[in-house]
Image (cartoon, rainbow, N blue to C red):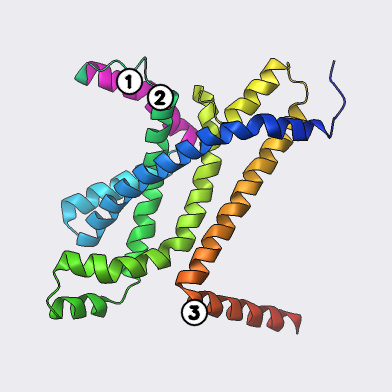
Amino acid sequence: MKRPFDFWYIFEAILDLLPYLVSTFMMLILSILGGTILGSILAWTKIRRRPLATGFADFYIYIIRACPPIVLLFLVFYGLPEILLRGFGIDTNHFSQLFFVVITFSLLFSATMAEVIRSAVAAIDKGQREAALSIGLSDMQAFIRIILPQATIIALPNFANSLIVLLKEGALAYTIGFIDVMGKGILMIGNQYGAHALEIYIALGLLYWSITIFLEQVFQKMEMKFAPDKVYRVEKRSEKERRKHEF
């Protein structure tokens, strides 16, 4: 028999779910680190324009971005153990689900970050690199001291959007038994035989919504701090467009 909707149960569910945000953030942070490192390597490969390496990077990015997250998650979860066992004799039966989740979402995030980083670097005037080289800086020094700080600021909005997408895609991790905030919610519904399912899903939605709003505010503050002129220009342009439509 289905129980009637209980508004106050939403708050009880949130209190039960909150401790499992630790697992969600752990997965998110590790995936960001892995994806950013791999994405930086791919972006550098594309920037250097070596035909073979660039072709491989393009192929990798195309394949990963075309693969649905849940399909890639299952491929990693079921396929990687076979590769490790048959190729290297490594038994993954004792590995945590977090390992496979981080591998999957690092791969997904790396494909996005490769394009974010490449486009941010490409937006920097080439004359700045040439000027840095002319005063005696090496190519690597010019990139680290001159290009990278500016590219980081340019990449902030796209990085923030990619991070939010990763947060939402990470909710799929429960499908392989990873118990984060989403996994706990599914367990709660199962343990209660579907009772209060609506309230629990609302609680999950509120938590993800709150995290998303928080991340958006953090990155907006960072962008205003490091690139106030850019933010001001965007706001003024939006205000002009709004006034134009009013008339």
Residue 119 sits in quarter: bottom left
Quadrant for the N terminus in the image: top right
Which numbered marker is on residue 81? 1
**Amino acid on which disc 1 is placed:** Pro
**Amino acid on which disc 2 is placed:** Phe
Residue 168's spot in the image, x, y percent?
56, 42
Relative to residue 175, is residue 15 drawn left or right?
Answer: right
Q: Against 58, is 227 above or below?
A: below
| The furthest residue to the right | 4
In three-dimensional space, the C-alpha distance between marks 3 and 1, rounded to whole angstroms, equals 50 Å
Quadrant for the C terminus in the image: bottom right
Which numbered marker is on residue 229? 3
Of circles 3 and 1, the one toward us is 3
Relative to residue 177, is residue 31 drawn left or right?
Answer: left
Q: Disc 3, disc 1: CB below 8 Å?
A: no
Residue 84 painted magenta: yes
Q: Disc 1, disc 2: CB below 8 Å?
A: yes
